[in-house]
Structures are given as C-alpha cells and as structure tokens.
Amino acid sequence: MESWQSTHEKVKTHMSNRSKILILTARTGGGHLSLADALRDLLEAHYSVTIVDMLPAFFHHHYRFIGRHALWMWAIEFHTSNRPGSAVAYQRLLSLLIADKLKRTLDEVQPGLVVTTHSLLSHAVKRIMRHHAPEVPFAMLFSDPESVHATWFSEPGADATLAPTRESYQLALAAGFDPQRLHLAGWPVREQFYQADTVNRLWQRAAQAGDWGMWIGPEGAEVARPAADVMKTALRAATRGSNDAATILKIREILDRAKREIEALEKRS
C-alpha cells in the first residue's frame, strides 16, 4: 500500500502550477465530510484547500427524512442506483442540478485540482468539467471500503482515483479503471487523531455514552462482521420485495426478534 505522501506526489503531477485544491463533498452521512476534512488536514500545509458541499439542499432534507423515518426508502434508492446503467443515468440527471453551482465555484476558486469524496459527485462533476474546466485535473477518493457503489464506477476517466482498501482497489481494476491512474492509498486520517490525548478522550467519551463504547474491545470486533452481514441481507431482501408489504413486515419481525434475544443475553451477563 502506498503512503499518503507518495500518493500525494503522484497526484501532484496531474496538477498545474496553481496551488489551490477544491474538495467536493456532501452532508449525507458524516463519512464524506470526515474524508474531506482529513484531506484538508493533510494538504493545507502546501495548498490552499476549499471544501464545498455541492449537492442541492433538497438532498440533505431528503436524506435526513429517510434516515429517520423511512430506511426502506433509502435501501430502495441505494440498490436501484447500484447498477452501471442506472448509476450513469442518475448522475447525468444530477449534473443538470449542480451545473450552475459547480461552474460558479470553479470560476471563484480557480483550483489546480478538484477532488471528490462523494460518489454522487463523480461522473456528474466530470461531465461538467469536461466542458467548463477541461484543463483542471479531477481526482476521486472512494468512501466505500469493501463493496464499492456503482456510482463511483460511473467515472473511470478521472485523472487519479484513490482506493482506501485493497478490496476497493481490486474492484476498481475489475471495473476497468486504468491501473496507472488508480492508487491504493489507505484512509486519510485527521491530524487531531495523531494526538494521543485526543484519541483517549474520544474513546472515554464513547465508553461513557454506552451506545458504541463496546466496539473498543475485541468482543465487539467479533460480532461486527456478522452484524453487518445481517443488515446487508435484510436490506437486499427488503429491496427485492419493495412492493410486497408482507415481506417488509416479515423482515422487521425477524430483526425485532433478534434484537429481543440479544437484549435478553445482555441482561443475563
């Protein structure tokens, strides 16, 4: 795996002499913003870094609503767009919604490099840049560690693509990405997490909260993968039965029963 220093040197070769970097992201989950912030921490010593949320406000309201009240709708949208053809079509439509804002941002920032940490801002962004800023290189940092969403693969023509894991790197190769422009880079980490006091304070806060403090120990790690597999299977089944209320109800009953049984184990321990 390449270090972030060596990856930075390779990406820098795609840049012009200008020392401004524009990072595009969106407030649809904390991961995309965290990646953008981590990139800024790593690059701002050498470049002027600007982070811009490029998705329309409607997306944020929609994401918050379905995240709180309609996870089944999120599952449908996720899986429906997770196909090559629909992923491209979805981003072509999105490019119409973000075109004016992206063009204004490019004109104002005048970046030497554009980087995205959000899959919906991949092909949609490059599609606009091909006409409005063809001389500015475009890079993508995958936010998916294992099963990479098809919307990331809708733009294999990025000047540089950064894969955080070996799994995402191999999937990108299989999807036809040029190995000369694909880099196994690992995860960028915010500067504050290199400080031991900050890390210890965060873990202590997590343990006190009780909601996810159990992930600190190896016991939590033992059940993390099977729990994730159950959730993926449930979402897949819910999507395939999206028009069948009985299927959705049955899935909820299974999950509720599993939750009650695990809670019973917790009470006995």
Image (spheres, rainbow, N blue to C red):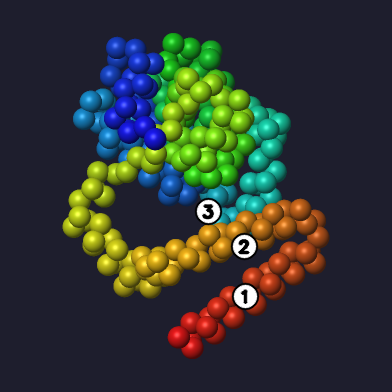
Q: Which mark is residue 235?
A: none
Give the side of residue 112 with respect to residue 27, left or right: left
Mark linked to residue 230: 2
Q: What residue do we see at 52% from left, 83% from top?
A: 265
> In the figure, residue 228 lies in which quadrant?
bottom right
List x then y, in percent, for residue 238: 72, 58
Kindly identify which residue carries mark 3. 64
Up-down: is 163 above or below 79?
A: above
Which numbered circle lies on residue 258?
1
Identify residue type, mark 2.
Val
- Horizontally, residue 252 falls left or right of residue 191, namely right
Q: How far from the left and from the top, in percent, is residue 9?
A: 31, 22
Q: Considering only order in the chain, which callout, 2 or 3, is on the residue closer to the N terminus? A: 3
In the rendered structure, which disc, 1 or 2, sits on the residue that comes first in sequence?
2
Instruction: Tell me where residue 137 sits by quadrant.
Output: top left
Q: Amino acid at mark 3?
A: Arg
Report helix, strand or loop for mark 3. Answer: helix
- For disc 3, the neighbor class at 10 Å (few under 14, some 14 to 19, many from 20) is some
Q: Residue furthest bottom?
A: 268
